[in-house]
Image (tube, rainbow, N blue to C red):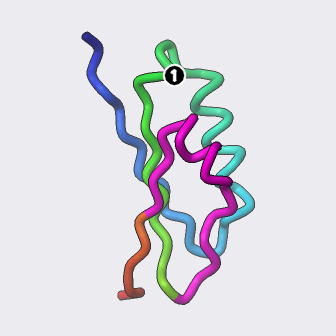
C-alpha cells in the first residue's frame, strides 16, 4: 500500500491558479491517486472554484479559516 501525499496550497488572492496547480501535480505525479490537495483560504477571500464532483475525484479539501 502506498502512502498518501498531502499538498497544502495557500490560495489567498490566487483562486484562478488552483486549478493549474492541481492539474499539474496530477499530471506529474507517479501515483496521482495517492495525492490529496488541501486548499487553504481565508474567510474574507473568495473560495477556490471546484465542483463537488471534482473535489471528490481529485481528493481536494478546502480549509477555510480566519485571516491572521
Q: Is residue 50 above or below residue 56?
A: below
Specify whether 3 is left or right of 64.
left
Q: From the image, which quarter does the C terminus lie in?
A: bottom left
Residue 38 x, y percent position in the rendering: 43, 52
Q: From the image, which quarter does the N terminus lie in?
A: top left
Residue 8 x, y percent position in the rendering: 41, 51
Q: Nearer the viewer, residue 17 or 55?
A: 55
Residue 56 x, y percent position in the rendering: 53, 41
- Please state the total of marks drawn on the protein image: 1
Specify whether 3 is left or right of 18.
left
Quick one: label 1, few (<14), some, or many (20+) residues within 10 Å?
some
Specify whether 13 is left or right of 16.
left
Residue 20 x, y percent position in the rendering: 71, 44
For the record, the magenta segment spans 44-62
Q: Residue at x 38, y 79 (%)?
A: 65
Label 1: which secondary element? helix
Q: Residue at x 41, y 65 (%)?
A: 63
Q: Residue at x 60, y 22 (%)?
A: 28
Specify whether 34 is left or right of 13.
left
- Residue 61 sits inside the magenta stretch: yes
Q: Is residue 23 above or below residue 28?
A: below
Q: Is residue 41 above or below residue 56?
A: below
Q: Which residue is mark 1?
A: 32
- Residue 2 sits inside the magenta stretch: no
Amino acid at each position: 500500500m502506498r502512502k498518501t501525499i498531502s499538498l497544502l496550497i495557500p490560495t489567498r488572492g490566487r483562486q484562478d491558479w488552483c486549478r493549474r496547480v492541481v492539474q499539474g501535480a496530477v499530471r506529474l505525479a507517479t501515483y496521482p491517486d495517492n495525492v490529496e490537495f488541501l486548499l487553504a483560504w481565508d474567510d474574507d477571500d473568495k473560495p477556490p472554484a471546484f465542483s463537488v464532483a471534482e473535489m471528490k475525484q481529485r481528493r481536494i479539501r478546502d480549509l477555510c479559516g480566519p485571516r491572521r
